[in-house]
Amino acid sequence: MSITSFPGGESLSRLASPQTKVTMPALSEMKRQGKPISALTAYDYSSARLVDEAGIDLLLVGDSLAMVVLGHENTLSVTMEEMLHHTRAVRRAVRRALVVADMPFGSYHASIAEGLNNAIRFVKEAGAEAVKIEGPRIELARALVDAEIPVVGHLGLTPQSLHRMGGYRVQARTAVAAQQLKTDALALAHAGAGAIVLEGVPREVAEEITAELPIPTIGIGAGPGCDGQILVFHDMVNLTFAPPAKFVRRYCDAGALIRSAIENYREDVERRAFPSDEESYHLPEAARRALGSQLAPEAELNAGDAVVNQDALKGWAR
């Protein structure tokens, strides 16, 4: 059992410094001012809280969780219920960032009505503040906006189109394909999309689209000319078990750090170095006498021994 805080409680640090909430219109204002937009994925409470407290602007509950969290080969297997489950966890952690939920494969492909109903579930049941859809689904984007649901588009290398594309291949490598990508991006913007993710396209194409679009572009493998950048959390901190894509920069090796910590823990358990006497609870003196305990006198009950986790009480107000 681990107790980090009481249900509904907040640390004093989070309450002491209120921050301006990032919204979809705020992203457009950032583009207008030329301020780069930072974005990351997150899939659970702890990682989302770290991402949010670090000041990231947009937090995507990506369907990439199918691979980096659930261990699937690609993103196609993740379900609506799984995406809703993880979006709820993320939303509980976030105070500042814009929370965007990825609509999984099959949740919006059959009809606009089905896509609209599933998007409503993300907003109503999971607390998402926008949804992301892949491909130039113009009518769906328009229907979502009409239903007051902010939309983030996703063009270029769209992982849900893996089989049609024949693998994870860079897109828009010809003049014709680049022009079609630009046309699709403009159509999504005119349909009301608030931002567009450009993935796996040449930087020159992304820069041209970014310059012409009235809404922000968020790049991943699309060069530095986009209005913002996004990476998969697990890629950035090396919590994956595969070679990184060309566009991934690893900012730390969390995998090695965690593995080392686990090995140290195992070794301490095996040589009975954990837990120590200081990490154990003790009987009060009267109870020791009653039980005939031979424990050393210094191992007396202190104030903290009455509570499983004394630190969890800090900052808690009833």
Image: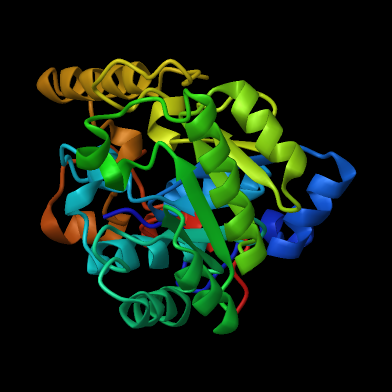
Q: Is 173 rendered above or below residue 165? A: above
Residue 314 screen position, x and y as percent: 59, 59
Res 227 visible = no
Percent across and percent down for residue 276 are 28, 30
Q: Position of residue 35 (x, y in %)?
A: 82, 39
Residue at the image position 79 percent from the left and 61 percent from the top:
20
Q: Nearer the viewer, residue 128 or 114?
A: 114
Q: Quadrant of residue 98?
A: bottom right
Q: How is the image coloured?
A: rainbow
Q: Is residue 32 left or right of residue 309?
A: right
Residue 259 in sight in this render: yes
Q: Is the N terminus in the top left, top right, bottom left or bottom right quadrant? A: bottom left
Name the residue at 21% across, 62% down: 79
Residue at point 30%, 15% (across, down): 243
Instruction: Pick whichever, 112 or 316, lies toward us.
Output: 112
Q: Position of residue 318 (x, y in %)?
A: 59, 80
